[in-house]
Image (cartoon, helix red, strand yellow):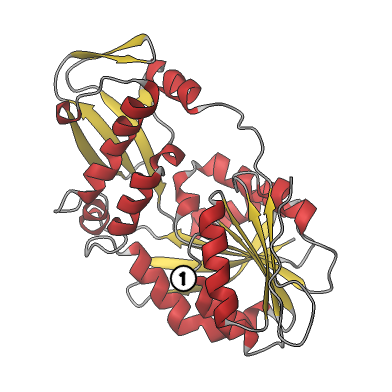
Amino acid sequence: MDQSLAVAAPSTTRERFVLHRALAAPASTFAEDVRRGLSASPKFLLPHYFYDALGSALFSAICELPEYYVTRAEDEILRTKATEIAAAFGPNVRLAELGSGSARKTRHLIEAILDRQPSLDFFPIDVDAGILTSSSRELLNAYADLSISAICGDFRDPAALLRPYLPPSDARTVVLFLGSSIGNLDPAAAGAMLANLRTALAPGDALLLGADLRKSPSILEPAYDDALGVTAAFNRNLLVRINRELGGTFDLASFDHRAFYNAAEGRIEMHLVSKIAQRVLIDGYEIAFEEGESIHTENSHKYDVATLAALAAAGNFRVERRWTDSNAYFADLLFVAE
């Protein structure tokens, strides 16, 4: 069921904010996914389960760490290149954003677009209705010529969220997928997600995609294994969540955080490694661990020119423009729908 909240625009009765609740029943539950992953060989857990309240707070802390360059690098791009990026979007656009969160970085683009056109329609998508509402209120207070149709749902199926809520328009639709979230998917899944998104767009519409670039492991690995241990706590919080929600008996002290660059696959891998042979109960069933056995919790793929071109082609896009930070650590790319 949709829920709408109207905020009056200056000198008009047009609604400036509507919240659509598009949450569908999940294909599987946390308990089912945990059991499936820990019964597999090798063991794994799905990374989107990192983000309970504590996990989200820990990730926010990670973004402030000196080792974690990703947030700063993309912020530099959007802060210094926003005018150029907005010009590449064209003269009449509307924005959607996958995983919008606080939309802090998005402000650079909103301001640059509103310097070029009299008003802007924004369609932020996030699984957290509270964050959508609070960030939308902040944006509406800051920009009088902005209207927001927020969509609460799981952006892993972007077409299912965009099709019902993007009305017909002469404006070019530009979808933002900032940060490096695309890298959490393996290449086939990333291509499939972009192909899914493409079905909701018209030829000539665009995607601004954030991608972390390949670089020395001496830079990559500390970003996922910081000196303060915040990323280690973020990783172990998956076990905390299993203990709390599924009656698990994980002893956190008996699992080490491990992060390393897998050069053959072009990705950072995060694991939780059992320090001893042990057995853990979860929701009434037993999981055995050998000493040194790991749970694979996350991948973060890194890209180069060839892999980005292949990703665009897999989604039926072409790469039109690319912007990087001053260190060439990160890129925001304009993919145009074929």
Q: Amino acid at mark 1?
A: Arg
Quarter of the figure that contains the C terminus: bottom right
Asked if residue 29 can be seen in this view, the reply is: yes
Q: State the count of labels.
A: 1
Left or right placement of residue 253 versus residue 53 in this view: left
x then y, percent, for residue 85: 57, 79
Asked if residue 177 can be seen in this view, the reply is: no
89 is higher (above) or lower (below) than 266:
below
x then y, percent, for residue 143: 60, 82
Task: Tell me which residue sits at (57%, 61%) in the image.
Answer: 133
Left or right placement of residue 315 versus residue 234 in this view: right
Task: Tell me which residue sits at (42%, 24%) in the image.
Answer: 34
332 is higher (above) or lower (below) than 255:
below
Q: Which residue is mark 1?
A: 104
23 is higher (above) or lower (below) than 278:
below
206 is higher (above) or lower (below) than 90:
above
Of residue 196 and residue 280, the one placed in the foreground of this image is 280
Task: Tell me which residue sits at (40%, 53%) in the image.
Answer: 302
Mark 1: which secondary structure?
loop
x then y, percent, for residue 171: 78, 74
Characterize the local packing of mark 1: few (<14), some (14-19) or many (20 or more) Cα atoms within 10 angstroms: few
Left or right placement of residue 286 versus residue 104 in this view: left
Of residue 3 and residue 306, the one placed in the foreground of this image is 3
Quadrant in the rendering for residue 84:
bottom right
Quadrant in the rendering for residue 14:
bottom right
Task: Point out the residue furthest to the top here.
Answer: 285
